[in-house]
Image (tube, rainbow, N blue to C red):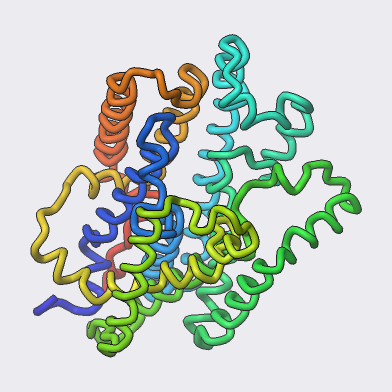
Amino acid sequence: MAGTSPDAPQAGRRLWQIDALRGLMLALMTLTHMPTVLAGPAGQPFGFVSAAEGFVLLSGFMAGMVYAGRARHEGMLRMRSAFYHRVGKVYLCQVGLLLFLFSVVALIALLLRQDAITGLMDYYLEDPLHAVVGSLLLIYNPPLLDILPIYVLFMLISPLLLRHGIRNGWDGILAISAALWLAAQFKLGGWAYEALAPAAGIRVSLHHTGAFDVLAWQFLWVLGLWMGARRKMQLSTARLVFPHWIVGTAITIAALFFVWRHVGGQVPLPHNASLNMLFDKWQLGPLRMLNLFALLVLLVRYGPWLSARLPRVRALEKMGAASLPVFCAHVVLALLALAVLGAPTPGRPLWIDAAILLASFAALYKVALVSRAPRRKTGNLSFLHPQPPPPLAH
């Protein structure tokens, strides 16, 4: 921005574009997780890429930008302390969601005999004690509650990555991260868990540790962390510019996958399970990453142009700025809806689905407003990332 230093956007103002994108990702996740007829169509709306990929990448970007700023202005120790403080908050949110699932939701589901929710917590119903202990150790992760644990793991290692990246460069970190993603494509993480878990006395099966392959998804976090730190630490505010051939290739790839997904459905090759693994969400298959990178190139190229011309959606910005409470609230609402109503059925009136979504988004927006109100005095508590601190006084 003209007339400001490179630190000005981070030091004094939020990046409303990032908040709006995170709010959009939250809205798409809500549509996907709520048991309505829109759950299927809302999944992977931009091709063979879901809201989860965008959310992890954006969260890593914000972490890199915010905490690199802390390291720059307050020192590495303060940066590390702030990271671990955030880890504690996210972990406590996970514990709260687990307690809600194991008590209120479990009771409702058992009373109403809702298979849609009891199937999500089968291990807890079979072995409650070990399930509770395993979940508190972030080993047992029921569906819908398996994303915060990977954030805790990523944030625990992030201070070391940021410190090394700022002082020594990111080439080695990115190379190791890419190698781990490649290892995930051969299921090496799962094999290692199944080999080591019995020796460590862990009884939780690999199936119950969560859908996200940590070795694969760390690549998105590390990539975002690098991009955010680079933006914060660079001396120039010059925007990244891609050659025309890269932009043209990205347009072609994004258009191809978009049409393929919406014409053929969410499963790219319904009769070929092996080739479908190239698009796999949980391992971030190679073609899925190609789709994501194409969208990322287009976002970098056309994002500023779009943000200057499209109307701002304040509701999405507020939800994105209060992402932790909004994310937790959306999980609570999805679990309650599944426990009370079960999975959507063809015979259910459409007005019920409409009422579910209207009530849910109204509740999420209220949560965003309430959670953001105290921050004018106490500071930002947005999802995973505190508001960037002002520069230290001289």
Position of 227 with respect to 285 (left or right) is: left
Instruction: Judge whether 359 appears above or below 293 on screen.
Output: above
Q: Please tell me which residue lies in front, 369 or 296.
A: 296
Residue found 38% across the figure and 79% down from its top:
230
Looking at this rendering, what residue extends furthest in the front direction? 271
The answer to whether residue 284 is visible is yes
Q: Nearer the viewer, residue 346 or 119?
A: 346
- Give the position of the N terminus as an image quadrant: bottom left
Can you give x and y, in whole percent of width and height, for residue 232 in the image? 34, 76
Q: Is residue 138 left or right of residue 352?
A: right
**Residue beneath the point at 55% across and 74% down:** 161
* 214 relative position to 162: left or right: right
Rendering quarter of residue 192: bottom right
Q: Which residue corresponds to the image point at 30% horizontal and 23% vertical from the top-left?
A: 350
Q: Position of residue 2 (x, y in %)?
A: 10, 79
Residue 27: percent from the left, percent from the top?
Answer: 32, 43
Q: Pick out the residue farthest to the right.
A: 199
Residue 56 occupies which quadrant of the picture? Answer: bottom left
Q: Nearer the viewer, residue 42 or 130?
A: 42
Above or below 330: residue 118? above
Q: In the picture, which quadrant includes the C terminus?
A: bottom left
Against 154, residue 37 (above or below) is: above
- Residue 385 seen in the current view: no
Tell me which corner region of the image, top left, top right, bottom left or bottom right, holds residue 276. Answer: bottom right
